[in-house]
Amino acid sequence: MAFVQYLVFDGVPLPLPDSYEVQMDDVEADSGGETEAGTTQRDVVRLGVVSIPVSFSVSPKWLKMLTGFKQKEKIAVEYFDAETLEMKKTEMFIEGYKAVLVKDTSYKGLWKVSFTLKEF
């Protein structure tokens, strides 16, 4: 059985993630809020801005590659969209990058890498 490819960065297929979540948030203008009558007014600037919290258990080779992607200002990302069950393309950046040594091995360790991808 073949696994679903969840993430591709700049044409490089990434390993199977330990956790993967697709979140869609609306961006609202500052002019929204509660009116004097007590009703809520939303001034939505953008609908469905994607953010993807993800984590991987990786070898040192993948740790180095993921750290390299973190240094980039923007990444061409193909991600598995949980709404349509198809791959979608967009430009994203990495926020909250964290690398933790899980187990020291003779091959420079097993690493847990986690971050959030944010859509521009």
Image (cartoon, grey):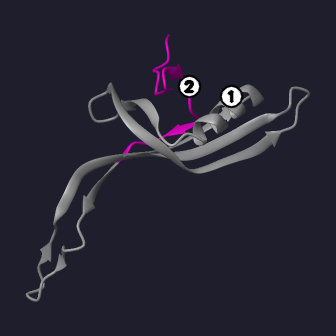
Q: Quadrant of residue 55?
A: top right
**Do the residues under discs 1 and 2 have CB atoms within 8 angstroms?**
yes
Q: How crowded is mark 1: few (under 14 residues within 10 Å), some or many (20 or more)?
A: some
Instruction: Return the residue nearer the eye: 82 or 98.
Output: 98
Q: In this view, does 39 lie to the left or right of 17?
A: left
Mark carried by residue 14: 2
Q: Is residue 82 left or right of residue 12?
A: left
Question: What is the magenta segment's predominant secondary structure?
Answer: loop
**What is the spatial separation of the Cα atoms under label 1 and label 2, in whole angstroms?**
9 Å
Counting from the top left corner in percent of width and height, residue 47 is at 22, 51
Residue at the (39%, 42%) spot, across then down: 22
Residue at the (47%, 21%) spot, across then down: 5
The residue pinned by badge 1 equals 62
Amino acid type, callout 1: Trp
Q: What stretch is highlighted in magenta?
A: 1-23
In the picture shown, does residue 90 fall above or below 1? Answer: below
Instruction: Return the residue nearer the eye: 115 or 16.
Output: 115
Counting from the top left corner in percent of width and height, residue 18 is at 59, 35
Q: In this view, does 5 lie to the left or right of 60?
A: left
Amino acid type, callout 2: Leu
Q: In this view, which residue lies farthest toward the right?
A: 106
Please tell me whether residue 43 belongs to the stretch shown in magenta: no
SS state under label 2: loop
Counting from the top left corner in percent of width and height, residue 48 is at 26, 48
Q: How crowded is mark 2: few (under 14 residues within 10 Å), some or many (20 or more)?
A: some
Q: In this view, which residue lies farthest toward the top?
A: 1
